[in-house]
Structure formats: structure tokens, C-alpha cells
Image: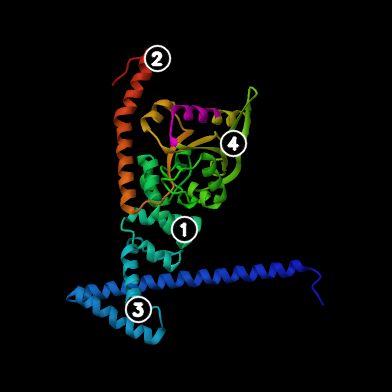
Amino acid sequence: MKLTNNNIYQEIKELLYSAKNRVYQTINTTMTQTYFQIGKRIVEEEQGGETRAEYGKSLLKLLSVQLINEFGKGFSVDNLENMRRFYLAFQKSETVSRKFELSWSHYIFLTRIENIDERNFYEIESIENSWSLRELKRQFDSGLFERLKLSSDKQKVKELSLNGQVIQTAQDLIKDPYILEFVGLPELSSYSESELEQKLIDKLEHFLLELGKGFTFVARQKRITIDEKHFKVDLVFYNRLLKSFVVIDLKIGELKHQDIGQMMMYVNYFDRFEKTDDENSTIGIILCKDKSKALVELTLPKDNNQIYASKYLTILPNKEEFKKLLEEEYVKVAYIDYCIRPLSAAIRAAFSGQTGPY
């Protein structure tokens, strides 16, 4: 005899799997909180010893032997040291209601991040975006925190460590550079814009993760017609958090001012013919191999909040290379702030017949 209504089986199965996942999450959270408390007791005991360094080493060895005898594997000296480090890293956030919502493996990795603001940021983002340990490591290795710092207003940098990445404006979406190592194109090889586009489509899930929160794919090679002339937009996305279309143009060489003009046309077209009245202004992102920040600054309107140019990398630099790259970008940003923007303002004032401070 068979069930006449197979839906009941599917519904019960989903209930059981859901319950299983909740039990797993509860066990994981309870064990992680327990490891935190174990780390706390180890630190407190060490601090009570006369010679902390020597006592600490012998304490972990003695505890490890006894705990393994009674509770089995999982309490090696290395693991106990992880619990100790875990407590030291997160003790300032200790509250009665503090919940550790990630896996123990996530927290072992997070404790190795020395910068507290950076560590807090990756914990928040891992929870909100359900990052696997592998994705967390990838985002860390790609310098997500540093890239967002570079692209954010100074007032918003501290908020990254308190609330993670909060998407309220177009600027909040932007990263510079974007890391596209998943496309599998070596840094020095020859490839076309269409090949890069195809690789991004082939790895769309990875690209969406790199773009960030709230993105949905809409179209590739979107055709638009203006006065019987046809143009094609490389990639079109929609960001549900901002309720905006996001059009992306790919440039495998150095950014030219004509590229910015073309993107302005795309953005204006979408604003006038694609978006609805209840949607916000279209955002344009030009992904290029290289760019002059001064050229971008002088080409775009002073109050620009729709069009952005970001570099992309097709390899994941090592930490030293990435640190050097970001330091160079910080220097360029400082140059823009203190040299180019005042000069740009003076030029605009001169052409408009105004006089203003230099």
C-alpha cells in the first residue's frame, strides 16, 4: 500500500531535517561556549601561578592527559591552547548573553586575526552571510576588510567592526580592487573582454559573493538602442537592498575617459527607460585592469554618487604583496583628497566665472 498524498512525507521529512539542523546548531553553540569557559579557567589559573610561562606549559600538558583519559580525543595540548587563545581574543566581548554562532573551526581561524576591528568584522559577516570556513578564509585572504576600508568614508570605517558591511548607499557596495582569482585567468596571460565576461558567468556564484550583499543577476550583453544605434552592456545586476540596477562594464586595459563617458550613457539610459518610479538611481561600475584616480576624479561630476571605477585582479596576492598594493592605494587616495580635488574645484570655479579659495 502506498501513500495517496506524498506531500505529507515531504513535509515530515523537512521537519525532521530542520530539527536535526537546530539540534546540531545548539550543540555547536553550547560546545563553543564551553570551550570559551575552559579557556577562561586556564588563563585564570595561569595568572595565579608564580611563574606564569613555565606553569602554563605544564598546566596544559597535565590537563590534556587527564581530560583525554576521561573525555577522549579533542583535548590535546594544541586544542587547549586554542581554547586559551579563544578566550584571550574574545574576552572583551564577554557578556552573560554572548552567543558564539559560528563553528569552532571558524573561531580558531578568527583568533589568529590580531586586529580586533578586523576580527569583529569577519565574525559579523560570517554570521550574516552564512560563510563556510573556506569562504571566510577566502574573504580574509582577499583583504575584504581592507578593501572596504579603502572604499568607505572615514566615518564609516569604525562601523565595519561594529555592524559589518551595512549597505545604505551606492558607495557602500564598492570595493577597490575586486579579486577575481576564481576565473582562472593568469595575471600575465592574454585574454579578451568577452573571455573575461564568459569566465565570470561560468563562475557566477563566486562573482556574486565577491560583489557582496543583495546582488541578483539580470542579463549579459544587454542590448540598448539609441537613435537606431545599438550598444551592449556587458553585465546587468540588481541590488535588492538599494533597489537599484547595477550595470558593469569590463575593461581589460587601462581606463580611458571615453569609458567613463560610455558608462554615464548606460546609467542615464537605465534611469530613464528601465527603472520604475519606486526604484533608486542606477549604479555603474567599471572594472578595469588599471586606472588613474585623477582622471576618474576630473571626468566625473563633483557630486557623483552613481558611477565608480575599480581595478580587478585575476590572482590572489600573498599578504605582503596585498599589503603593498593597499598602501599604494592609500597614497593615491590621499593625493586625490589633498591635491586633485582642490585643483578640480578651482578649475570648475574658473570656468563658471566664480572665484574661490585654492
SS of the residue under disc 3: loop
Camera-side mark, 2 or 4:
2
Residue 22 visible: yes
Quarter occupied by the C terminus: top left
Q: Residues within 10 Å of mark 2 (few under 14, many from 20)?
A: few
Quick check: 327 left or right of 176?
left
SS of the residue under disc 1: helix
Camera-side mark, 3 or 1:
1
Q: Nearer the viewer, residue 190 or 274?
A: 190
Q: Residues within 10 Å of mark 4 (few under 14, many from 20)?
A: some
| Residue at x-position 37% and y-position 45% | 149
| Residue at x-position 65% and y-position 23% | 228
SS of the residue under disc 2: loop
Magenta-drawn segment: 253-265
SS of the residue under disc 4: loop
Quick check: 247 left or right of 12?
left
Q: Which mark is first along the chain, 3 or 4?
A: 3
Q: Which residue is mark 1?
A: 135
Q: Amino acid at mark 3?
A: Ser
The Cα–Cα distance between marks 1 and 2, rounded to whole angstroms, is 51 Å
Q: Position of residue 121 (x, y in %)?
A: 40, 53
Q: Which residue is mark 4?
A: 279
Q: Which mark is first along the chain, 3 or 2?
A: 3
Q: Which residue is mark 3?
A: 76
Q: Which mark is first along the chain, 4 or 1?
A: 1
Q: Amino acid at mark 2?
A: Ser
Q: Residues within 10 Å of mark 1 (few under 14, many from 20)?
A: some
Q: Are marks 2 and 3 in contact (CB under 8 Å)?
A: no
